[in-house]
Amino acid sequence: ADLLPDVVRTLYSQTGVSLSGNLLGAMVLTMIYWPVAPSRELIAWCVLFGLVWVLRLVTLRRYAHAGWAAAASQAVHWQRLWNAGAMASGACWGLAAWMFYEHGRAFHQTTLLLIIYSFCVGSITLMASQHRAFFAFISLCFVPTILRIATLGSTDNLLLAGVLSLVFLMTTILGRAYRRTFDRAIELKVRTEMLAVQLQTEKAAADEAKRAAETANRAKTQSFAAASHDL
């Protein structure tokens, strides 16, 4: 719980890059599918994506405006907002696969799959520390994509859906592996901080004992000097 503010700050510090990547991906998708996809569907998707993108940007600005201290005291709230925005973005990309994959040629379909998978891979380092949120995000991207390809029915499409299912599984495993590595790094950090505190405590105790010994030695010296003077 003590580390949650740092985790949330990391999420928001990467949001600008994430939003830029999402915007670039949406622009590429729109550009390549505009000649081949139904214009109304493409415009509707762009409007939905734009709303989600703007809401995530507004959330980022609000977090930055709140300041570190205030944001840290409401870390759970800001984490939920960030996760909600990420889930909405994942749903947009899954919807894009469902709406547009059947249109166009192999070039369009390959580009769409690469865009979606790039966001799934990119989410590993950013979201794998929250495994449930990570799994939900990649599921929102992968599952509609796999189902849409499978519904097209040809042997090649069924094989591709099977391959993507394996890729989905591999991505999940990678996320779990990164989570374990992240947990070990956090555990090491906590241990290091505890050792540093213990060292400071022991040093303070040693310094106090040293001062007490010096005081006792001075008192003993003064006592001997007084006794010698009396003699």
Image (spheres, rainbow, N blue to C red):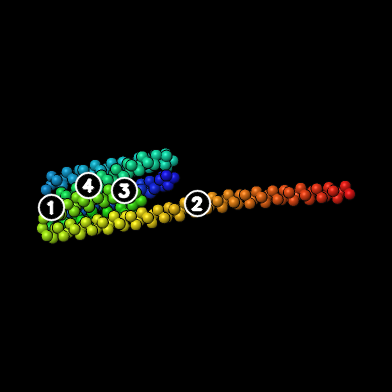
Q: Mark 1 and mark 3 in contact (Cβ < 8 Å)? A: no
Identified by mark 1, the residue type is Thr
Q: Earlier in the sequence, mark 3 or mark 1?
A: 3
Mark number for residue 193?
Answer: 2
The location of residue 96, given as percent across then percent down, is: 19, 49
**Which residue sits furthest right?**
231
Crowdedness near tag 2: few (<14), some (14–19) or many (≥20) residues, C-alpha within 10 Å:
few
Identified by mark 3, the residue type is Arg
Q: CA distance from mark 1 to mark 2?
A: 54 Å
Crowdedness near tag 4: few (<14), some (14–19) or many (≥20) residues, C-alpha within 10 Å:
many
Q: CA distance from mark 3 to mark 1?
A: 28 Å
Q: Earlier in the sequence, mark 2 or mark 4?
A: 4
Disc 4 designates what residue?
A: 92
Q: Is residue 111 visible?
A: no
Identified by mark 4, the residue type is Cys
Q: Residue at x 29, y 43 (%)?
A: 84
Select label 4 or label 1 by which is in front. 1
Disc 1 designates what residue?
A: 151
The location of residue 71, given as percent across then percent down, is: 40, 41
Q: Residue at x 16, y 60 (%)?
A: 159
Disc 3 designates what residue?
A: 132
Q: Mark 4 and mark 2 in contact (Cβ < 8 Å)? A: no
Q: Is residue 205 visible?
A: yes
Q: CA distance from mark 4 to mark 1?
A: 19 Å
Locate the N terminus and report the quarter of the image it occupies.
top left
Who is closer to the viewer here, 138 or 56?
138
Q: Residue at x 36, y 48 (%)?
A: 11
Secondary structure at numbered mark 4: helix
Q: Earlier in the sequence, mark 2 or mark 3?
A: 3
